[in-house]
């Protein structure tokens, strides 16, 4: 009987929200609409950004954790199971400019 880690649903939800927030901040700070404007492409709906963040529970380790590994312990619980598939944490697409509103800052499409 082999043991395998399972991610606590509450912790997973918090992780998903924080990663989404950081990705959103990154895109806002990237100022991509100004790059398109610089090259005369802002009026065209040419830029679509797709991203996906996956978590592989099979790679998380909980044994002999030291201080910097403590967050992993909060994510993990022991159970008898075969390999766990990757978890999609965030999957989104951003269109610049927004095809619906025309906003040069973009929107999620």
Image (cartoon, grey):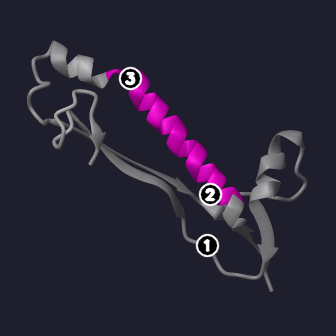
Q: CA distance from mark 2 to mark 1?
A: 17 Å
What secondary structure prevails in the magenta region?
helix
Residue at which label 3 appears: 30
Side of 7 where 96 appears, left or right: left
Please report the residue visible at 83 percent of the width from the left and 39 percent of the height from the top: 68
Residue 14 part of the magenta-drawn span: yes
Q: CA distance from mark 3 to mark 1?
A: 35 Å
Residue at which label 2 appears: 13
Residue 40 part of the magenta-drawn span: no
- Secondary structure under tag 1 reads loop
Whether 38 is drawn above or below 57: the answer is above
Contact, mark 3 vs mark 1 (Cβ under 8 Å):
no
Please report the residue visible at 28 percent of the width from the left and 28 percent of the height from the top: 105
Q: Relative to the observer, which residue lies in front, 107 or 68?
A: 107
- Magenta segment range? 11-31
Contact, mark 2 vs mark 1 (Cβ under 8 Å):
no
What x and y, as percent, mark residue 109? 26, 49
Please report the residue visible at 29 percent of the width from the left and 40 percent of the height from the top: 107
**Residue farthest along the top direction in this orientation:** 38
Q: Quadrant of residue 5?
A: bottom right
What x and y, as percent, mark residue 71? 78, 48
Residue at which label 1 appears: 84
Please report the residue visible at 86 percent of the width from the left and 59 percent of the height from the top: 63
């Amino acid at each position: 009987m082999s043991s395998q880690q399972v991610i606590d649903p509450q912790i997973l939800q918090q992780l998903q929200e924080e990663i989404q927030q950081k990705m959103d901040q990154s895109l806002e700070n990237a100022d991509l609409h100004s790059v398109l404007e610089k090259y005369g492409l802002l009026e065209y709906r040419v830029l679509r950004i797709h991203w996906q963040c996956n978590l592989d529970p099979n790679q998380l380790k909980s044994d002999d954790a030291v201080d910097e590994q403590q967050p992993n312990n909060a994510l993990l619980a022991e159970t008898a199971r075969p390999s766990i598939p990757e978890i999609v944490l965030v999957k989104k697409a951003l269109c610049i400019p927004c095809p619906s509103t025309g906003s040069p800052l973009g929107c999620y499409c």
